[in-house]
Amino acid sequence: MNTQGHITPSGGQAAGETTPGSMKRAYSQYFAHLSVERGLSKNTIAAYHRDIDKYYAHLAARGITALEKVTREDVASFIDFLGGMARSSLARSLVSVRSFHTFLFEEGITSHNPAADVAPPKLPARLPKALAVEEVEALINAAGVGDSPVALRDRALLEILYGTGARISEAVSLTADDIDTENRSLRLFGKGRKERIVPLGTYALDALEAYMVRARPVLAAKGKGNSVLFLNKRGNPLSRQSAWEIIRRAAERAGIEREVSPHSLRHSFATHLLSGGADVRVVQEMLGHASVTTTQIYTMVSVDTLREVYASSHPRAVK
């Protein structure tokens, strides 16, 4: 390596030739590939440099001077070599090494890829960012300002997303036939066109009826006739991108500074149900999750919430 930690490039090499000199050439060829062929930014390439430099130091510590001799165990033990880094940093470093070995193999520099089945460390599941109930109310109110067809549509859309936990793709593909006002329910088609029936709350039902009676006919008159429930200003089906934009503008008007997406409302739907005492398997059914494990991420609560519940519920929590 040079004094700055990067291996000095040199001339070409024959396929499969992995002497100490060829390790330098492989390094040089790989970074030329990242820069010229993949067009990565200087900062990204610098991060790859740091990761591969550490990897080469790891190989040197194991007495390896030829890339052809690297084994799966050598790659897997790189995580231990890095020590107490954050899991996200460990995962990124291993991704860099996997990319490096994939390049070597595909270019014929090595005859095998020892990193092919070495998985990066599993990152801890992140708690979904649910909106507070007050934020949801402010969002819906900001979307449905006024009595115009567009305002009634936007309010109905957000009430449906939050009131049923529907995915945005499910909401924009709804038709009038999917609504059962008598039984106060909604039919959704999830992944793989799997059908599920979810209840409609009073707020969602009222907003939906107002849209269907007073707004949708006005929008539909501008189009060529379409059975899809939510229409744009031209009378055509509302796209997912347009739905995102409706929510983004509503969040801006409501003064919500963090990013809000259609999935934020789905997260909030699940979190608020479970916080209110709903059974996780009922929530699983309403979300359309194939496995309850997917739903259980919403059951994670903060230490502060646990402390509040404990303080208010346990007879010996406080004097």
Image (spheres, rainbow, N blue to C red):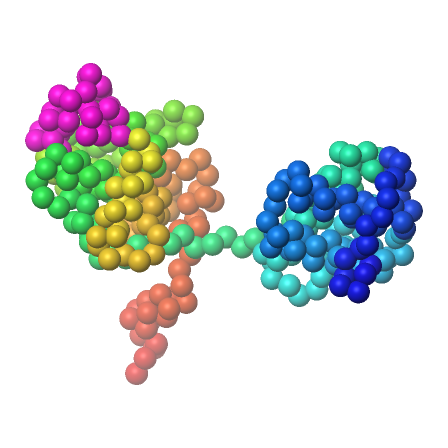
Q: In the displayed image of the protein, which residue is found farthest to the top?
A: 224
The image shows residue 96 at horizontal and vertical percentages of 68, 49
Residue shown at 31%/40% (left/top)?
A: 244
Q: Nearer the viewer, residue 286 or 102?
A: 102
**How many numbered discs?**
0
Residue 190 left/right relative to 214: right
- In the picture shown, does residue 15 fall above or below 96? above
The image shows residue 307 at horizontal and vertical percentages of 37, 70
Residue 169 left/right relative to 115: left
To which quarter of the image does residue 127 belong? Answer: bottom left
- In the picture shown, does residue 260 fall above or below 178? below
Residue 73 left/right relative to 204: right
The image shows residue 226 at horizontal and vertical percentages of 22, 19
Residue shown at 85%/58% (left/top)?
A: 60
The image shows residue 163 at horizontal and vertical percentages of 24, 42
* Region in magenta: 211-238
Residue shown at 41%/29% (left/top)?
A: 191
Q: Nearer the viewer, residue 211 or 282?
A: 211
Q: Nearer the viewer, residue 144 or 127?
A: 144
To which quarter of the image does residue 133 belong? Answer: bottom left
Residue shown at 62%/52% (left/top)?
A: 42
Task: For the N terminus, give its image quadrant.
Answer: bottom right
To which quarter of the image does residue 43 belong? Answer: bottom right
Instruction: Specify whether residue 188 is in view.
Output: no
Task: For the C terminus, give its image quadrant.
Answer: bottom left
Magenta residues, dominant SS class: loop
Confirm whether the magenta stretch covers residue 218.
Answer: yes
Instruction: Specify whether residue 193 is in view.
Output: yes
